[in-house]
Image (cartoon, grey):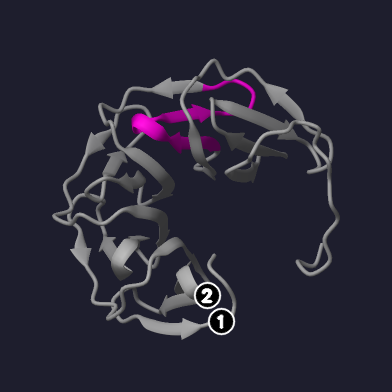
Amino acid sequence: TNGADWSYQDTGLGENFCGVACGNGKFVVVAAGGFAATSPDGAAWTEVDTGISGDFSKVRFLNNQFVAVGSSGLIATSPDGNTWTERVTGSSGTLEDVTYGNGLYVAAGWPNSTILVSEDAISWTNTPTGTSAYLSGATFGNGKFAVCGTGGTVLTSTNGTDWSSMVTGVSYTFSCITYADNVFVAAGSSGKTLYSPDGVSWTLLSTGMGTW
């Protein structure tokens, strides 16, 4: 309840979870092999049959639905965490994260800074970025999308189509990014974080901790 004191919960499922999200009164976790499970309280978990064989890498609750992404351009959506629909993306890239803002869904991954954009999470368009970085984190805030990845890469866009590479001045890999309290924060290798109030000017901080 406070982010400091944690209790171990044995789900009994035996999977290596790679993503968790919460929405519509339940938690959802995903894993490789199209695995998903739901819980009303984070303690008792029930595996669901997604009918999907691809490997999930992340799940988010976006615009009142769960959206999961993964290998070989995998994107699947669910209104409740129980019934899943795999979407045709036309991409063979590995998608690592997905976000929503300005009426658009944006999924990010690799190779070659893979970006997929959709207005409804059903039909997706591959958008060139002009960079070759592996992207692994995506967020939306302050009117813009921001994605991060290898080599200190941070890309931003206001419309999901036109992307600009930000000068971070570092070469660390950043694996995740979020926007909260009017600040973008990316975290990654060697315990390093980047923060920016506007998505343009970025400052490197060392947490003194290990890789995120």
Which segment is the magenta one?
Answer: 65-84
Asked if one can make out residue 182 in the rendered structure from this viewpoint, the answer is no
Q: Quick check: 28 left or right of 199?
A: right
Choose the circle earlier in sequence order: 2 or 1: 2
The percent position of residue 180, horizontal first and vertical second, equals 52, 69
In the image, is residue 179 part of the stretch drawn in magenta? Answer: no
Left/right placement of residue 58 relative to residue 133 reads right
Residues marked 2 and 1 touching at CB (< 8 Å): yes
Q: The disc labelled 2 sits on which kind of residue?
A: Gly
Q: Is residue 75 above or below residue 184?
A: above
Q: Position of residue 92 (x, y in %)?
A: 28, 31
Q: Which quadrant is home to the C terminus? A: bottom right
| Depicted 137 relative to depicted 97: above or below | below
Quadrant (top left/top right/bottom left/bottom right) for the N terminus: bottom right
**Helix, strand or loop at mark 2:** helix
Binning the other alpha carbons within 10 Å of mark 2 as few (below 14), some (14 to 19) or many (20 upward) gives some
The answer to which of 172 and 77 lies nearer the viewer is 172
The residue indicated by pointer 1 is 207
Type of the residue with mark 1? Thr
Residue 23 visible in this rendered orientation of the protein: yes
Indicate which disc residue 191 carries: 2
Along the line of sight, the residue nearer the viewer: 70 or 180: 70
Q: In this figure, what is the number of numbered marks?
A: 2
Tell me the element at label 1.
loop
